[in-house]
Image (spheres, rainbow, N blue to C red):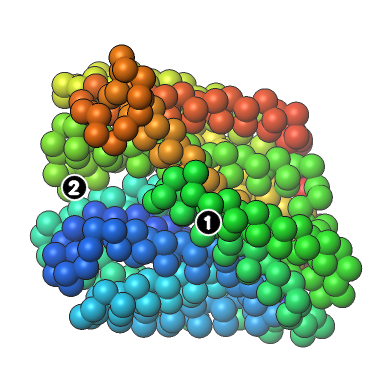
Amino acid sequence: MDGAPTSQHGRWWALATLSLIQLMVALDATVINIALPSAQQDLRFSAASRQWLITAYVLAFGSLMFLGGRLSDLWGRRTSLVVGLVGFAAASAAGGAARTFGELVSARAAQGVFGALLAPAALAALTVTFREPKERARAFAIFGAIGGSGAAIGLILGGALTQWATWRWCLLVNVVFAAVSLVGVLVVVAGGRGDRTSHLDLVGTVLGSAGLFALVFGLGRAVTTGWGNADTWLSLGAGGVLMGFFVVWQGHSQHPLLPLRIVTNRTRGGSLFALFVTTIGIFGLSLFLAFYMENTLGYSPLKTGVLFLPLVGALALSASLASARLLDLVGPRPLVPVGMLLGLMGMVLFTKLPVQEDYLGHVLPGLVVTGLGLGLIFAPSTASATAGIEARDAGAASATVNLAQQMGGSVGTALLNTIAVITTRRASCAPSGIVSPLCHTTFADTLHGYSVAFWWAAGFFGVGAVITFFMLESGVPEFEGELLPLL
C-alpha cells in the first residue's frame, strides 16, 4: 500500500503539493464562468449553449467520483495522481487551443474525468500521510481552507486572466498548475503499490456512475429549464432508483466500489452531511453575490473577484487559528455546529443587500462572518470524514467526501437559483399576481429574489447546526497502526 513520507519536512512538502492539486480542481468549477462571454464571442456559439461548458465538467466529475476513488485504492495514490495530472493538463491544453464549441465542450468533459481521479486521490494521499493528531489537524486546516476558497479564487483568477490576457488562459493556466504539482508528486508524495487483493466492482461502477450522472444531469436541467420540466424529474427519478440499486449491490458485492462501512459511522455521516449543507450555501453565496456585484452594481469581473478576498482571508484565518489548534483537543462537535451558526448569520446579513453601492456596510460583514464559519466547518468535517478508515479504503472515503460537496453544489445551484427566479418574477408581476416573463423586473425585484434565496440558505445552515450537534462526537483521536482513527 502507499506509504507516507517519513520525515516531517517531506510531509509538509507533500501537503503543499496536494493542496495545489486540490486548488486546481476546485477553482476549475468557477474559473471558466467569467470567461464564458469572451469564449462565446470568439467561438461564436449561442448563449443557450454556454451552460454546457459548465455542465460537461460537472457531469463527468460528479458521475465518476466513486470510480476515481476506488481506482486510487487499486492503483495506489501516487500512480493515480500522476495519471490524473497528465490527463488534466492535456485536457486543459486542448481546451485552451479549441477552435470550435464541440472541441471546447469535449475538453471540459475530459477535465471532469481526470478531476474525478485527482480529487479523491489527493485527499486519500493526505489522509494516509498525516497520522499524528496535531499535525493532522493542522494539515487538514490548510487543505480545507484551500478547498473551501477554491470557488472564490476561481472567480478572481478567471477575472484577471480574462481581463489581462485571454479567456483561453482560464484553461491553459491548469497546465502550469499540473506541471508544478507533477514534480511535487514524483518527489515528495510517497510511492508504493495499490491494493492488489481487490478487484474493480464493474456492476457497482455502472450503477453508481449512471445514477450519479442522472442526478447531476437532472439538477442541471432544473437550472436551465426549471423544475416543471418532465425531463428534470425523469432524470432525478432514474438517478434515485439507480442509486438505490447501487446501495443494495454494495452491501452484497465482494469488492464494493463504496464499502458501506465507510458511511455508517455516526461522526463520519455527520461530517458528510456538514460538507453537503455547507457547499449548498457556498454555491448560493458565490452565485448571487457575483450577480449582485456585476449586474446590479456594475462592477467588472475582476473587481468582483477581488472583492471576494475577505471571504478567503476569513476562512483561512478561522481554519488555521481555530480548527488547527482545537480539533485535536475537542474533536469536531463544538467546531462544526458553531461554524454552521456563523454561516447562518452570514446568510442573514446578505438578505439586506441594497440597490445602491455599500460594500463596506452590507457585503463585507457577511463575507467575513461566513468565512469564519466555513473555516470551522471544512477542516474538521474533512478530517473526521476520512478518520477511522483503513488505508485500503482511503480513496473510496475521499471520493465520498468530494461527492458530498459536488452534490451540495449541484443542489444549491439548482434549488436556490430556482427560488430566486420564481420570487423575482412574482415580485415583478405584483400587484396583478399573474406570473409572466413579460412582467417588468426592477433591481429591487431581483434583490428580493436574492434575499429569499439567502433566507433559504440560512435555513440550511440552521438545520445543519442542529443535526451536526447531535451526530458529531467530541473527543481526542488516537492513532493506532495503519488505521486512521475515528474522531
Q: Earlier in the sequence, mark 1 or mark 2?
A: 1
Q: Who's the residue at 72% across and 53% down the image?
A: 387
Farthest residue, direction top: 431
Q: Nearer the viewer, mark 1 or mark 2?
A: 1
> Which dot marks residue 301?
2
- Amino acid type at circle 1 is Asp
Q: Who's the residue at 33% across and 37% down the image?
A: 288
Place residue 299 in its image quadrant. Answer: top left
Q: Secondary structure at mark 1?
A: helix
Q: Who's the residue at 55% across and 29% down the image?
A: 461
Separation of marks 1 and 2 at Cα, in angstroms: 33 Å
Instruction: From the top left corner, tell me how far across and down residue 18 is, in percent.
Output: 49, 65
Q: Is residue 163 above or below residue 447?
A: below
Which of 133/364 is in front?
364
Residue indicated by mark 1 = 231
Q: Residues within 10 Å of mark 1 (few under 14, many from 20)?
A: some
Q: Is residue 63 above or below residue 228?
A: below
